[in-house]
Image (spheres, helix red, strand yellow):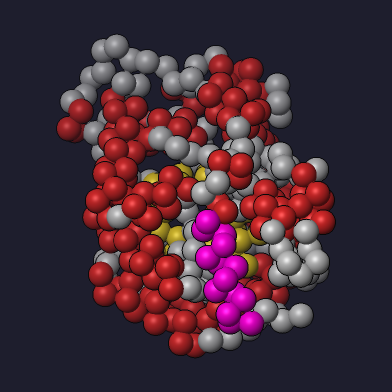
Amino acid sequence: MKESARQFRERKRSHIAVALSPETQVNGKARALLDEIELIHEALPDVNLDQISMERTFFGYRAQVPLYISSMTAGHSKGVTINRRLARAAQEFGWMMGVGSQRRELNDPAASKEWKIVRKVAPKACLLGNIGITQLIDTPVETIEQLIDHLEARALFVHLNPLQEALQPEGTPYFSGAIQALERLVKRLSVPVIVKEVGCGISVQTVRRLVEVGVQIIDVAGLGGTHWGRVEGLRAATNKRGYRYRFDVSLAFWNWGISTVESLLQIKRENVSCQVWASGGVRTGVDAAKLIALGAQAVGIAQPLLQAALKGEQALFELMKTISEQLRIALFVTGCSHINDLNERKVKYGILRVNEFC
């Protein structure tokens, strides 16, 4: 059954509420793997803290730090306020920002007004579009190009979420033809395509398939943070349309996925040639530093920023300033004068223990 505009808005609002529940957050092995990564302390760094550069350039945009606000929400009234705050903060601190799904715009052209509001308050922010793979399959590239224009996006996230779609009462678990659709998009879209998961990770085998069709940037978005299988299971538990049984179904998948660390290590070990981004369970600038040392070119954060944005702009600004400074100090105390100096040589022997899981 086709989802109405009202049902779409209700679903997006419920996603925000449920995603903030502690039950949706993965800990255990995935968090332990990130904690296993140890950066080597340098007691005598040959650099001043204020001389450290964290800049990297993406799509012609010079990011002050290689961090991005990972895609969260869009297409409903509360989303406008959240995205306006996030975009202002992204512009202020030189982060990139992935917006929530632009799916609603495919059937409701008026939905693009949200981005006009966002652009008004953050005209220089580096915004990245977002569409789901299941919508991409049946949508002409020309229509996707319009989404880019509405947002003035520098790149497009295409998100992969098979587990979420399978468990979601309103889900669209129709992935046949997805790889062909991606190949068409990569060849014809005017901006780079970033393929990302939403919290279950991407295996090295899938990375290879993506690279073969021309995808150059992949966000592994692994297990470790908000788990959308849990989100949809918890939503199903209160569903009044005969879908409550899906909560019981979801329980078998509450820890399903490949951790962010495992995904990065597999790609590094197999020496697959592509630009890798990482998100999933990142909570501090030190977490981000660890993933960058393992090969991530950029690191995304979502749930903590959503919590802060709901409190207000000041809380969001303070959190992003804190995370940026944590990353800067992590560079300083590992003896790095530039973000590019942070690599596997700065990782302690703990990485060998992590390799046992790969």
Instruction: Specify whether 201 is left or right of 279.
Output: right
Which residue sits at x=62%, y=76%?
7
- Find residue 83 and report its horizontal and vertical position in percent: 38, 64
Residue 244 visible to the viewer: yes
Instruction: Specify whether 79 is left or right of 332.
Output: right
The vertical placement of 95 against 261, above or below, is: below
Quarter of image, res 267: top right
Reply yes or no: does residue 8 show up in magenta.
Answer: yes
Decide which of 131, 343 is in the foreground and name it: 131
Quarter of the image containing the C terminus? Answer: top right
Residue 183 visible to the viewer: no
Instruction: Specify whether 281 is left or right of 343.
Output: right
Which residue sits at x=26%, y=18%?
45
Quarter of the image containing the N terminus? Answer: bottom right
Residue most toward the top? 43
Which residue sits at x=36%, y=49%?
308
Q: Which residues are magenta?
A: 4-17
- Find residue 39 and report its horizontal and vertical position in percent: 44, 21
Which residue sits at x=51%, y=49%?
20
Q: Main secondary structure of the magenta part?
A: helix
Reply yes or no: does residue 65 show up in magenta.
Answer: no
Quarter of image, res 51: top left
Decide which of 143, 193 is in the foreground and name it: 143
The vertical placement of 342 against 258, above or below, is: above
Decide which of 142, 274 is in the foreground and name it: 142
- Find residue 90 and report its horizontal and vertical position in percent: 32, 56
The vertical placement of 14 against 145, above or below, is: above
